[in-house]
């Protein structure tokens, strides 16, 4: 196996992440005030997209990882979008790759800010759920239905993800 390749994780932003999915966050003023003005609503932040089946909400608990983080496996879900919503306000690592035919292209890495969540669009190659702080508990909204909805790809050499300054950004 050839040596690891390095990815520098970018801060997650809506513009940078747009080719891969949606950033979910309560940024700016809410679109609506509800409950007699006592509750702000940031409305319709994610494009949930399923070929069939239905949307389901599951809870996942993933092992906490640290940076630098080494990976070679990505996956995609051809029949539905998938949202990762941390159950506490901590950052997590998001790895994505554009499609290149039926394979992933060069990956990119993002680190969320506390309070951000993401929704991968349907068929977007992405890394596994990768918390870097907290308890690893996430709500995941994805397709529930018959048939295979998971494709995996292993790169021929691993990538190592770190922050620009080489530090662990989870603290």
Image (tube, rainbow, N blue to C red):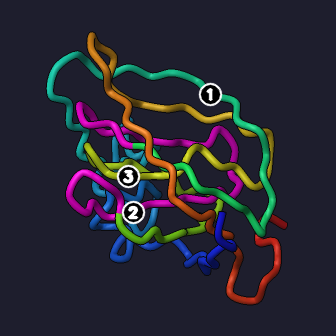
Mark toward the viewer: 1 or 3: 3
Q: Residue at x 31, y 64 (%)?
A: 98
Please tell me which residue is depicted at 23% across the width and 45% down the height of the picture: 47
- Residue position marked by numbered label 2 in the rendering: 97
Q: Relative to 97, does residue 61 appear above or below in the rendering?
A: above
Q: Earlier in the sequence, mark 3 or mark 2?
A: 2
Percent x, y of residue 4: 67, 72
Tags 1 and 3 touching, CB below 8 Å:
no
Q: Which mark is residue 60?
A: 1
Q: Residue at x 38, y 20 (%)?
A: 56
Mark 2 falls on what kind of element?
strand
Q: Residues in magenta?
A: 76-104
Label 3, on which residue? 125
94 relative position to 137: left or right:
left
* Percent of width and height locating residue 46: 30, 47
Report which quarter residue 66 is drawn in: bottom right
Of the image marks 1 and 3, the number of the one nearer the N terminus: 1
Q: Secondary structure at mark 1?
A: strand
Residue at left 42%, top 41%? 83
């Amino acid at each position: 196996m050839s040596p690891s390749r390095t990815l520098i994780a970018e801060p997650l932003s809506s513009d940078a992440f747009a080719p891969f999915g949606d950033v979910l966050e309560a940024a700016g003023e809410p679109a609506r005030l509800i409950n007699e003005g006592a509750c702000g609503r940031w409305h319709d932040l994610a494009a949930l997209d399923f070929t069939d089946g239905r949307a389901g909400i599951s809870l996942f608990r993933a092992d906490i990882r640290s940076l630098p983080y080494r990976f070679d496996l990505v996956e995609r879900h051809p029949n539905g979008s998938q949202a990762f919503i941390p159950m506490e306000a901590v950052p997590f690592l998001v790895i994505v790759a554009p499609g290149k035919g039926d394979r992933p292209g060069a990956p990119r890495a993002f680190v969320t800010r506390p309070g951000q969540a993401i929704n991968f669009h349907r068929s977007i190659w992405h890394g596994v759920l990768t918390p870097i702080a907290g308890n690893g508990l996430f709500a995941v909204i994805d397709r529930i239905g018959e048939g295979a909805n998971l494709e995996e790809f292993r790169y021929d050499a691993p990538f190592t993800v770190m922050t620009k300054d080489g530090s662990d950004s989870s603290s």
